[in-house]
Image (cartoon, helix red, strand yellow):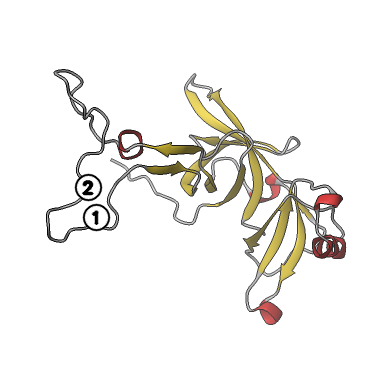
Amino acid sequence: MVKLLIGRKLGMTQLFTEAGTVIPVTVLEVGPCPVVQVRDAVKDGYRAVQIGFGVRKEKRTSKPQQGHFRKAGVEPCRVLREAPVAGEELPKPGERITVGQVFAEGGKVDVTATTKGQGFQGTVKRHHFGRGPVTHGSKNTREPGSTGQHTWPGRVYKGKRMPGHMGAVRRTVKNLTVVKIEAEQHRLFLKGAVPGPTGAIVCVQHAKTARVMKKS
């Protein structure tokens, strides 16, 4: 069984339980993911499968990639990822894996995606610096302040928190609960938030370190 699937973020909404409790959920369109290539332990040294997601126009696909997809008998995919496999039997190239085959309601998953890009930001927004006074002629309202030292060492230390590019980095949110699965629509409802804007490509896999709640 494949442990990871590729999808895209559709947005956030809320679901109601039978007791009337509101659960904030993120809706993901996960799969179906065709198997493009199989990695065998004897030939490649490890066991995994290469899966795809989305459709790419053939004119936007390079000749080597077209041959790679044609060998597997699938259409050119927009995204390719390698997924670990559990069990002895490996899926065959061209086989389509759906969300209902991999995940179950109530399970825990880890979601990896690229966060929203915030552009160039100052220290107040980027590092949560406190601002200076805004009265009595102050000219240090949102400035970062001193960044260096005196004659010695006469330089700025590495890792100094300063203004710069913020966001647009890969992040993983762990141990999200699968609230609901709509297998026919390939939709996955996860409790909580997921990195990235609407339409972002996400990788969903079984939680590696599922937390166990202690009884009080």
Label 1 crowd (10 A; few <14 / some 14-19 / many >=20): few
Residue with the mark numbered 1: 156
* Kind of residue sitting beneath label 1: Val
Q: Residue at x 39, y 49 (%)?
A: 212
* Kind of residue sitting beneath label 2: Thr
Image quadrant containing the C terminus:
top left
Return the residue nearer the eye: 39 or 209: 39
Residue 77 at x, y = what percent? 77, 52
Return the residue nearer the eye: 133 or 107: 133
Mark 1 or 2, nearer chain start: 2
Marks 1/2: CA distance? 6 Å
Q: Residue at x 17, y 24 (%)?
A: 138
Q: Residue at x 51, y 42 (%)?
A: 115
Image quadrant containing the N terminus:
bottom right
Residue 90 at x, y = what percent? 72, 67
Label disc, if present, on residue 61 of the rendered structure:
none
Residue 185 at x, y = what percent? 74, 35
Label 2 crowd (10 A; few <14 / some 14-19 / many >=20): few
Vertical order, 25 against 176 (above or below): above
Label disc, if present, on residue 147 of the rendered structure:
2
